[in-house]
Amino acid sequence: MITHEEQKVKQMERLGVRGSENKIPAKRVNIVSLKMVREKSFLYAERAVRSPEDGYRLFKQFLGELDREYFVVMCLDTKNQPTAINICHIGSLNASIVHPREVMKAAILSNAASILLCHNHPSGQSDESREDVEVTKRLVEAGKVIGIDVIDHLVIGDGEFVSLKEKGYI
């Protein structure tokens, strides 16, 4: 009969840990899988996003009226057809902290060829801020590294929007 201690030693030897001088147990590594889960969907009659106005209409349909700043990424296939929309961050009344890894995670998981970014200004003003421009530039650079184009960043206010691509920031 094998004792508990002998079983432990055999297990550690199988894992490549040898000798009694090595008392640190092996690190357990989880094996995981990642997948996106559809929460809901809606119909988009235009099928493809061909202009900032198309993106604005789709985001407006998705976002509605909000009292907080939402940063959203729309993932597009090679024909600029939306495949997924993901809320990357919900901010406060006047700010949203956006990390490239959160934006690009949604794009990678949905096999996006490109992405369209959007966030709302609850104040109703659609003018871009310095922070909006800086975040956009960081996301464009991150997209270049992994091969996902950022085609535009829309800032939505009350019934209007600003395209950072049209303003020359992308």
Image: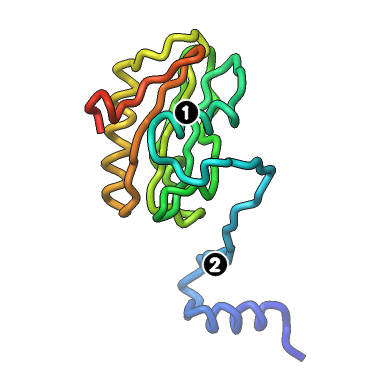
Disc sitting over residue 56 in the figure: 1
Task: Judge whether 126 appears above or below 42 on screen.
Answer: above
Pick the quarter of the image with the C terminus: top left
The residues tagged by marks 1 and 2 sit, at their Cα atoms, a distance apart of: 55 Å
Residue type, label 2: Pro
Viewer-proximal residue among 46 and 74: 46
Residue visible at 44% across and 53% down in the picture: 77
Q: Amino acid at mark 1?
A: Tyr
Q: Residue at x 47, y 80 (%)?
A: 16
Q: Is residue 158 left or right of residue 79?
A: right
**Which mark, residue 135?**
none
Residue 96 point in image, percent of width and height: 47, 23
Mark 1 or 2, closer to the camera: 1
Instruction: Say above or below: 80 vs 18.
Output: above
**Percent position of residue 144, x then y:** 27, 48
Q: x, y percentage for residue 10?
A: 60, 84
Of residues 155 and 143, the one nearer the viewer is 155
The residue that appears at 59% across and 29% down in the rendered structure is: 61
Query: Residue at 59% across / 57% down in the picture?
Result: 35
Per the image, label 2 sits on a secondary structure element best described as loop
Kindly give the residue lying farthest to the front in the view shown: 45
Crowdedness near tag 1: few (<14), some (14–19) or many (≥20) residues, C-alpha within 10 Å: many
Which label sits on residue 25? 2
